[in-house]
Image (cartoon, helix red, strand yellow):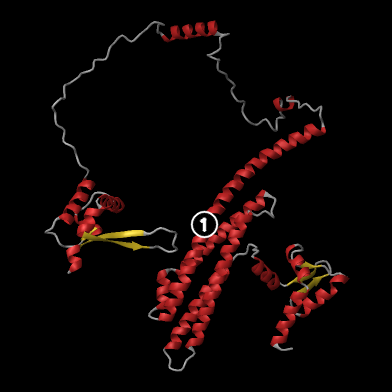
Amino acid sequence: MGRKEDSKAAIRALNKHIDVIDESCYIARGQIEDLPENEQVINSLSKNRLAYYLDESLGVQLHSKVRGLLDHVTSRHRFRERHGAFSGLIEDLENTIQSYKQAKTRRYSDGERFFDEIRETVMELMDTLTDTVNMFHHIIGDEFSVVCDIDEKIKQTSRCKQEITKLNHVFNQLSVDKMNSWVGVDLQLERLLMKVLKAHVDKCLKDLAASNRKLVKMLDKLMKDKSAQRLNKLIDSFHGKYTSEPGYRPDISSFLNLPVCVSIAEKLPLGGYGDLDSARDEDLLIDASLSALKKSGGTPNQLNTEDESVVITDERGVELDEKIDSLIENVEFFFDALFDSEHTDDLSAIKAYYQLKVASSVEDWMLMITSYFEAQRKSVLKIANVQELREIIPPFDGTVYVTDIIFKKVSNEIR
């Protein structure tokens, strides 16, 4: 048979027996029982390489490609480790980019074919990343509802969290610097990698980070549920004992007189405290208090008759010099220079920080500059334009770092 005939026959087999295939995928773990009523289904799927025979006990197993196709079109996801597949795709992408660049240097070459391979690898990488994000969303939303045992849920949740960590390590290879080195001066690669791929990767990695935070919360909740489960099991065991034997009364003598092999710990010193608010024992408590006071050498009516002398001085009319913090003083110096009409040069917050030798951290200095600017925004914008130099550290988590603030005098802008 030809290529088209094989494809049509496989599609017809899937369409004809879709009810059995769907039930096998989601109920029987991909297995089809080797029964007379399933003989036609088994023969049709086996003939088209969509299922294969294992043995008499396991029956016939659907091919994983069929299960993956149904999972994809029905948006059902099973947990699978993807970091290995991503690592392989990134390695293929890098090798194909190198071949593409080498092909462009030759006059007669197949550079366009290599670029098509690059585009296909990028699309496959984006599709795989989208499927992975959807997989984690499905797992977190479902909270492993198919698993009943708490220990198994903890194991699966920890495994998912480790997988996200491995994926983050893999995608460190797709940093901006790495993509820039791949792009060079090629406009086609720049459009494909820096605009299409990077935007998709940043969005999906942000979603993965959110999934990771939810997994951490889920794991913490499961650990608390596990500790509660131990207590519940203990309560259930006692309840079962008293239910099965209504007249059961535990004998504590066995715990008071333990065997020698068990009594290996030292005896605990026992003690107690009197109830000082007890009206019944009021007289006894008064006698005990007086007795303790006599033994300590004091008297009941002993009072401290020594008055502490307090010296009061008249401070009216005295002037106190207010000390201004050096950080605030340097900020005022900075904006005094900005408002000075004779000073026409542009001002940089970072350069001023080092020139003034500010005795604080760069973060505090930038925060004070920003706060002063917001308080005097209208006045500052009349004489200067403000420009923030920003930096984004991939993978992007929503945080933008301001590395410097430039105040450009309006007169300089006009010139």
- 384 shown above or below 252: below
Is residue 99 depicted above or below 71 in this figure?
Answer: below
Residue with the most extreme bottom position: 108
In the picture, the quarter occupied by the C terminus is bottom left
Hey, which quadrant is residue 343 in on the image? bottom left
Residue at 40% x, 62% y is 393
Q: Secondary structure at mark 1?
A: helix
Q: Which residue is mark 1?
A: 210
Q: Position of residue 157 (x, y in %)?
A: 60, 54
What x and y, as percent, mark residue 35? 86, 69
Q: Residue at x 40, y 8 (%)?
A: 298
Relative image position of residue 45 (x, y in whole percent): 77, 76
Q: Is residue 408 above or below residue 298?
A: below
The picture quadrant where one finds residue 191 is: bottom left
Q: Nearer the viewer, residue 119 or 147?
A: 119
Quarter containing the N terminus: bottom right
To which quarter of the image does residue 47 belong?
bottom right
- Towards the viewer: 295 or 388: 388
Amino acid carrying label 1: it is Ala
Q: Residue at x 42, y 72 (%)?
A: 178
